Amino acid sequence: MPVTLTRRAALRGGLAGLGLAGLGAAGLTGCGGAPATAAIPEAGPAGPARRGGRMVIARPPASGAETLDPASSLSAYEYLGALYDRLVVLDDTGAAVPGLAESWESTPDARTWRFRLRRGVTFHHGRELTAADAVHTLRRILDPATSSPMAGVFAGLLEPAGLSAPDRYTLQVALAKPAAELPSLLSGYQCGVLPASGEIGVGTGPFVLGGFTPAGRGGVTAHEDHWAGRPHLDEIAFASVADAQARTNALLAGQVHLLMQTNLDTATARVVASSPRTTVARSRNAQWYTIPMLATAAPFTDPAVRDAVRLAYDPQAVLDTAARDAGVVGGDNPVPPEQRDWVSTLRPRDPDRARSLLRRAGAEGLELDVYTSAYDPLFTPVAVAFADSLADAGIRARLVTAPADSYYTQVWMTRPLCVSYWFTGRPIDQLLNQIFRSGSSYNESAWADPRFDAMLDAARAETDAARRRTLYQDAQRYVATHGSALTPMFADRLVGMSRDVRGYREHGFEFDYRGLGFA
Amino acid sequence: MTAYVLRRLGVSVLTLLLASVLVFVALQALPGDLATQLLGRDATPDAVAALREQLGLDRPAWERYLGWLGAALTGDLGTSLVSGDPVTADLAVHLRNTLLVAGPAVLVGIPLAVALGVVAGLYRDRAPDLVISTICLVGMSVPEFVVATVLVLLLAITVPLAPAVVLDGPTAPVADLAGAIWLPAIALTTVMAAYIVRMARAGVIDTMGSEFVTTATLKGVPRGRIVLAHVLPSALLPTLNVIAVNLAWLIGGAVVVEAVFNYPGVGTLMLRAVQNRDVPTLQAVAVLGAVVYVVVNLAADLAAMALDPRLRSTR
C-alpha cells in the first residue's frame, strides 16, 4: 500500500522526536523546557576563592575595530577593568572611594582639586605611576582626536590646561566651573590610567595583557605586584562569541566559566540555573529600561500629552511582564535605588486623570507607535505591557518591531516613542547631566528644561554634602514628574557562570577582577 | 565544446559585475553606514563626521564604487573598513575555515545522499524508502538552526563528544579548529543531503518507469546492470543542479549554522560585514559567492553533457 508522506506530517513527527531528545537537557530554546517553579538564584556561589587557576570568559565582541584604548568608544569593555585602574572608583552605593588616588581635597569653591596618588604603584612594564600619567590620561580624553564618549562629560568643566602635576604624586585639576562631584566623574571606565609614555594595553590593573585580537581570542595574566595584592586567578582567557545563544551553549558545554556582558533571558536563566554544571548570579538593577518620549516630535511636544502617558501606563505591569522578580519598579526616576542619594518617586497611576488631560489637550483617542526590537530580550515584553496598559486611558498603542542592527541609529532618538535601556553605574551627577540635560548628545528624549538644568548646576556647585544630596533629590523628583523619558523599571542582569566560580562581584561598571577565582 | 565553455565564462564575468553592483546598491539602501554602526549609541554627530572622513565615506557612492572596481580589476579587493586588514587575506582565511567544514560535508554527504536516494527510488514505497524519505522530509522541514541546536544539545552538552561552539578566532591554526568542525559539518550535511536524496529518488523512479528500462528488462539485462549503466546516468541529470546549488550554499556562506557554532567561516564574515556595513569585505564575499555559483553551475552542466549524449549533439 503506498504511504503518502506530507511535509506537514513529517514536521509533526520530527518535532515530536526533537521534543524527546530535548527532555534530557530541558530544551535550549526555552519552549516548554524547565518547570516554571525552578527559581533563579538570588546570588552566585558563595565561599572563598583559592589562589590560582585559569578562567575562560566569553564576551560579546563590539566589532572588528575593537581596541584596548579605554578612552575610545570602540573599546573592548571586558579587558578594561582587568588592565587598568582608575583614580577613583564607585562603591555599591555610588560613593566615590579611592582607587589610584588615595585621597583628594578641593578649595571651598570646588573649582580646584588636588588628588594625592598612591606611592609605589607600578605599571605592567615596571615603571612607577606618577601624576604625569594621570595628566596624560585625562588630556587624551579631552583631545578631540580621541573622540572619547567621556569628553562630553567634562565639556565646559575641564580644559587640558587645567591639568597639572605640582609634584610627583599630586594631580591638580583646575575647573572652569565648580564641580563638587568631580571625583565620581573620574570613575568612568573610560578613565583607566595609561602611562604617559603612550603605550596602549599597559596599565596598573590586576592583570597584564597576554594577547588581544579584535573580536577574537585574548588573555591576561596576574599582575604579581598589584598595589592592592595579587589577584586570585593566574590567568583569564577571553573568547569572543557574537551570538548570545552560542555563548550560553559554550557555558552549558563547559567550554567557558563565565559570561560577561550577557543578560540571560528568564527562560534561558532557568535552564542554566538547573544544569548540574552551571548556575546564575545577579548584578542587581544592572540596567534601567526607559521609554523616551521625543519632546521635539508630535504628539510629545505638548507636555500635557507626556503627563498623560506617564499617568496612564502601569510600571508594575511592565515589571511583571518583562522581569518578574528580577527587578524593581522605576517610578520614572533613572537613579537606581541602591544609590545613596536616591529618593522614592513612586506614585499611584491615574488613567482617569490621564484621560481628562488628553481631552483638555484635544488629543482624545490618541494613537501611538511604540518601537521595539530584538536588540535586548526585554524590549518587546516592556513594550507589550506598556502599550497594553495605555488602553486604560483610551490611548491606542501599536507595536512596531524594527531591525536590531540599526535600532540605535534609525529608531532611538529619531522615532517619537521607543523602548531602550542603559547600564546603571554612572555617578549621579554624570547620569543626570549626560542623559537629561538640555542639548547633551545622550539626551534621548531631547527634553530641554532650563529649570532642571539650573537645578543640576546648583547641585554641582554645592559643596555641603547634605545640601547637595537634597538638591539631587529635588532633581530626581523633577525629572520624574516633568521629564520626557519614562523609567518603568530596573532589571537585574542574570549572569551565567560555572558552579565552581567564586568571588563574582559586579555593580554598575565596577567588576571585581581581583576577587574572581575558583573554589 | 570549447566555444561553449568560453561563452559561458564570458557571461559569468557579466554576472560577477552585476552581483557587485547589486551588493553595493543594496548596502547603500540599508539604513546607517559603517560610522553609525560602529559607534552605536556613541554616534554623536562630531564622532560620526570624523569617522566618515577618516574612512572616506563622505565621498559620493558612485565614486567609491568605481574606485573599488578599478582596484578589484587589478586584483586588489581593498582593505576592510573595520579592521584595516587586506580583504583578500581576510577572505582567504575565512574561506579556508569554511572549506574545512564543507570538505567532509561534500566528500561524505553527497555520495551518501545520492546512494540513499537511489536506494529509496529502487525500493519505492517499501520499508527502505519509507525510512529514508521520512528522515529526509524531517531534515528538509526542520530549520537548520534547530538541527544545529539539537546537535549541540546531544553531542556537546548531554554527551560531551565535541565542543559546542568555536572559541578560536578565524586565524587559528587548522589543528586547533579540527576538533570543532564535526558538529557544523554534520549539521550542514543533514540539511543539504535531504534535498539531494529527494531529487535522486525522484530521478530514479522516473527513469525506472521509462520505456528503455522496460525494454532492457524484457531483453533480460540483469537488474544491477540496468541500474548502474542505464538508470543512473539519466536519473542523476536533474540531481546535478541540486548538488551544484548546495555546493554554492556551503561555500558561499552557511550563515545560520556558522552563527550557532560561532564558527569563523565565510558566513560569519558576511554577517559581520553586513552588520557593520563594511562594503569592501561584503563585496569580496559577494564576488566569491558569485564565482562559486558560476563555477559549480558550469561544472554541473559539463557533467550533464558527459552523462547525456543528447545534450552534446545539440551543441
Image: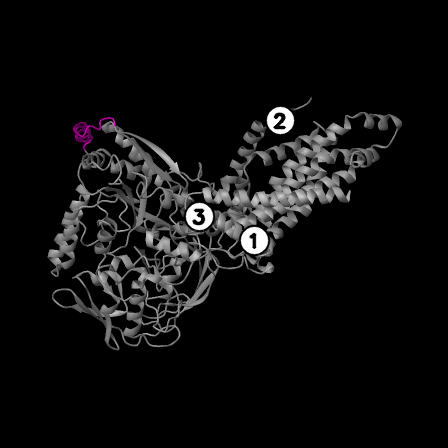
Task: For the C terminus of chain A, give its image quadrant.
Answer: bottom left
- Report how far apart the C-alphas of labels 3 and 1 lie in the structure: 39 Å
Name the residue type under label 1.
Answer: Gly
Q: Using the rendered image of the protein, determine whether residue A396 is visible from the camera's viewpoint.
A: yes
Q: Position of residue A335 (x, y in %)?
A: 22, 49
- Which is more toward the observer, B312 or B304? B312
Residue A15, how many percent across, how many down? 53, 34
Label 3, residues with CA under 10 Å away: few <14, some 14-19, many ≥20:
some
Residue A492 image offset from top left, x and y in percent: 31, 48
Asked if the magenta segment contains residue A351, the reply would be yes
Asked whether B249 or A501 is in front, the reply is B249
Q: Secondary structure at mark 1?
A: helix
Q: Are marks 2 and 3 in contact (CB under 8 Å)?
A: no
Q: Find residue A30 and report its image quarter.
A: top left
Report which residue position mark 2 lands on. Answer: A5
**Relative to B53, residue A118 above or below:** below
Residue A15 horizontal side relative to residue A258, left or right? right
Can you name the residue that lies furthest to the top here? Answer: A1
Q: Horizontally, is A32 left or right of A430 in the view?
A: right
Identified at 48% across, 44% down, the residue is: B27
- From which residue to which does the magenta span run? A350-365
Provide the residue designation for mark 1. B70
**What's the chain of the residue with tag 2?**
A
Which residue has dot 3 on it? A244
* Residue A516 visible to the viewer: no
> Label 1 vs label 2: CA separation?
54 Å
Q: Point out the tag, 2 or 3, that comes first from the N-terminus.
A: 2
User: What x and y, as percent, mark residue A162?
Assistant: 22, 68
Distance, label 2 to label 3, CA atoms, is 37 Å
